[in-house]
Amino acid sequence: GDSVTQMEGPVTLSEEAFLTINCTYTATGYPSLFWYVQYPGEGLQLLLKATKADDKGSNKGFEATYRKETTSFHLEKGSVQVSDSAVYFCALKQAAGNKLTFGGGTRVLVKP
Amino acid sequence: ETGVTQSPTHLIKTRGQQVTLRCSSQSGHNTVSWYQQALGQGPQFIFQYYREEENGRGNFPPRFSGLQFPNYSSELNVNALELDDSALYLCASSFRGGTYEQYFGPGTRLTVT
């Protein structure tokens, strides 16, 4: 079945540092890929998405590129802020399917 | 535009009891999905409802059941609660026929003692 693997956290950074969170997936066909963010005590918020190979999703300074050849969708941000402290989830959805398959999440802590 | 809402926020139940969680979809959405998020893990798909019928189910036993109402709101029912049912339960709504993006509510934290 489909699966998503993320780098384990926590990832601790200083403000204005560069952030990368690795995400790889196993799936048949061409799923859509997503990054969700979960702030403390809250539900999930869609951060960005990509629906086909080589698409780049971007939002709030975050970017991720759908790499079919490496089955990856790594999340990057050039300069993090304390407010970016959260848990980040990579997820996929098959075109014909009705569910999101999530990775285990990566906790990011940004220190001033 | 009203987002996805869930009630209650927190709930404490005893093993063997039954619980009902509620979800109101985002305006304009016709599909509701439920996920279970254990502490420190990613959400796991429980099931989805569309047109008041179950439209896909994850690897959860039959004691997890649901309903969708004509106004697209939904309930998740769990019978014979077990300690491992303690988790954050997330509801997500989407519009079938559109981009199918799922928008999540804040969740209900269920603790089974």
Image (tube, coloured by chain):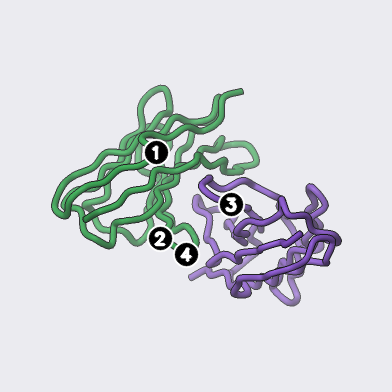
Chain colours: A purple, B green
- Which amino acid lies under the numbered mark 4 shown in the image of this protein? Gly
Residue in the picture at 20% in, 53% down = B81
- Which amino acid lies under the numbered mark 1 shown in the image of this protein? Thr
Q: Tell me, yes or no, whether the two marked residues, 1 and 2, touch with CB atoms within 8 Å.
A: no
> Where does residue A57 sit, x and y in percent of width and height?
78, 54
Residue that label 1 marks: B9
Residue that label 3 marks: A38
Residue in the picture at 82% in, 52% down = A61
| Mark 1 residue crowding within 10 angstroms, few (<14) / some (14–19) / many (20+) | some
Work out whether residue A22 or residue A107 is closer to the camera in this orientation and state it.
A107
- 1 or 2: tag closer to the N-terminus: 1
Q: Tell me, yes or no, whether the two marked residues, 4 and 2, touch with CB atoms within 8 Å.
A: yes
Residue that label 2 marks: B38
Q: Is residue B28 visible?
A: no
- Which amino acid lies under the numbered mark 2 shown in the image of this protein? Ala
* Chain containing the residue with disc 1: B
In space, the residues marked 1 and 3 are separated at their CA atoms by 16 Å
Residue occupying the far left of the picture:
B16
* Chain containing the residue with disc 2: B
Work out whether residue A39 or residue B5 is closer to the camera in this orientation and state it.
A39
Q: Which image quarter holds the C terminus of chain A?
A: bottom right
Q: With respect to residue A82, does A13 lie above or below?
A: below
Mark sitting on residue B40: 4
Secondary structure beneath label 2: loop
Secondary structure beneath label 1: loop
Residue in the picture at 71% in, 61% down = A110
* Chain containing the residue with disc 3: A
In space, the residues marked 1 and 4 are separated at their CA atoms by 19 Å
